[in-house]
Image (cartoon, rainbow, N blue to C red):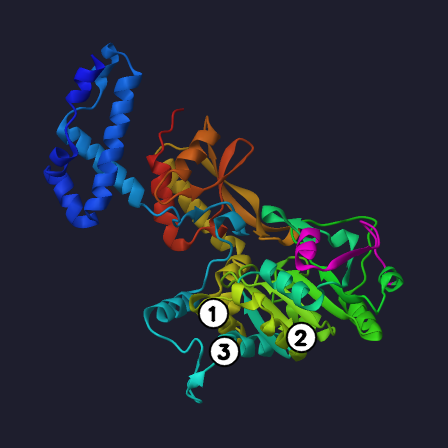
Amino acid sequence: MNHEVLRKLPSIDTLLRTDLLTKLIGEHGKTVVIGAARAELDKIRRQILQTGAMSNQGLVLHVDDISQNIANQIRVRLRPTLQPIINATGVIIHTNLGRALLSRRAKIAMHEAASAYSNLEYDLEAGRRGSRYIHAESLLCQLTGAESAVVVNNNAAALVLCLSTLAKGHEVLISRSQLVEIGGGFRIPEIMHQSGAKLVEVGSTNRTYLHDYETHLNPSISTLILRVHHSNFKIIGFTHEPGIAELAALGKKHGIIVMDDLGSGTLLDTTPFGLAHEPTIQESIHAGVDIVTASGDKLLGGPQAGLIMGQKAIIAKLRKHPLIRAFRVDKITLAALQATLLAYLENKAITEVPVWQMIALDIETINLRARYWQKQCSQIGLHAEVVDAYSTVGGGSLPGQQLPTKALAIETNSPDTFTKNLRLNTPPVIACIENNCVMLDPRTVLAEQDDDLLRAVRKIEHPY
């Protein structure tokens, strides 16, 4: 009986002659449509063979119905997996959601770099090959006071490159409190091992003193002192770590390179915004550190990149290492980074760079938007209240620090189902659940996304 049903299935040629699939062939090409048609027919055949004869009555066997299923499948297949979302979590630098948003200036620069040939590695004045690294070096040096700089594809790459170049086969001293693991299982000890450097732990988990470093220093085999930003955690209570200026002075005393892996890489002081002080790149350079590394897509607010700044002789060594080519950045990244750095140079970061716009956003503006959302929700019978809440900076920056905000708390019988429906919306909306309510924080929702967010909320059925 199942075989009789199988014989009723239309052929691929028959399906391709339908008006719908003929149109789709013109739009997407025959290969795409045939692939989807074969997949749909295979699925129906499996359903027929896996079910009894009595169950085959509900199968889709009509040519037009199968063609529509194929068309739906093509739409799903051609939909990009990377898509824009609405971040209503209140986490400004959300690693899972793409970290820092780029400024309008950076987006324009990226478009221009992608739309025409450029002098990426061409010296216009000399008329010969140049270096791609000049496009960010001068700006980084002006902003930080460093002698030289180079950019790689992320801060992990920056760390690997520095250790491989400066410490392979030699000892690197680091406090036990800084042997961190950050997102994706990135562990400092493993990176050191991979680079060929020998890890020397000094001090204890909670207290490390300058004499701990000095005790373990052996100028014949010790080549580098490394300080690593705690990133996404904070040690409180009975703690101590020497300041970066102390480490820099110790390094100069013994002829040892001192490196500061800052991670978040801020150029602005965070304290005026009610946040704890986050070490800046300039502070480390001015303290006498030989080499500083930082991320481009955290508090800097630019594209993903690893920024390496410091002494000219050290940067020159890094540029000659074979790994530099494997870690190099492309023209799009350099264009966005240069545009972002120009905003800092012109003292426009707070008004132009989205990360700083969100950090600096005043509570009254946030409250007005939350009240507007509440009003729109009440019109569809959805119970929601504007409540006091907290936003976080995120991205391994300022652990434990929060910014007061106003959030919309939506009451629902099933907050898990509600947030899932928001995630499956187009565009997806990512929210949090607190006290059995769905929480939407305006701080991280762009003003132009309000209508899309509210449409997503209206689509959800609200049984009360």
User: As shown in the figure, which amino acid type bears the numbered disc 3?
Assistant: Ser
The answer to whether 457 appears left or right of 42 in the picture is: right
Q: Does label 1 or label 3 sit earlier along the sequence?
A: 3
What are the residue bounds of the magenta stretch?
Answer: 189-210
> Relative to residue 231, is residue 423 depicted above or below?
above
Q: In the image, what residue occupies the spot 44% across and 70% down? A: 335
The answer to whether 434 appears left or right of 34 in the picture is: right
Q: Secondary structure at mark 2?
A: helix
Q: Does label 1 or label 2 sit earlier along the sequence?
A: 2
Q: Position of residue 361 (x, y in %)?
A: 52, 58
Q: Disc 1 vs disc 3: Cβ atoms closer than 8 Å?
A: no
Q: Disc 3 vs disc 2: Cβ atoms closer than 8 Å?
A: no
Q: Position of residue 238 (x, y in %)?
A: 84, 49
Q: Residue 334 bears which disc, if any?
A: 1
Q: CA distance from mark 3 to mark 2?
A: 17 Å
> Mark 2 = which residue?
314
> Mark 3 = which residue?
131
User: As shown in the figure, which amino acid type bears the numbered disc 1?
Assistant: Leu
> Relative to residue 105, is residue 87 depicted above or below?
above
Q: Position of residue 291 (x, y in %)?
A: 68, 70
> Relative to residue 374, is residue 249 depicted above or below?
below
Q: Does label 3 or label 2 sit earlier along the sequence?
A: 3
Q: Is residue 327 visible in the rendered structure shown here?
A: no
The answer to whether 309 appears left or right of 175 in the picture is: left
Q: In the image, what residue occupies the spot 21% across and 42% down? A: 33
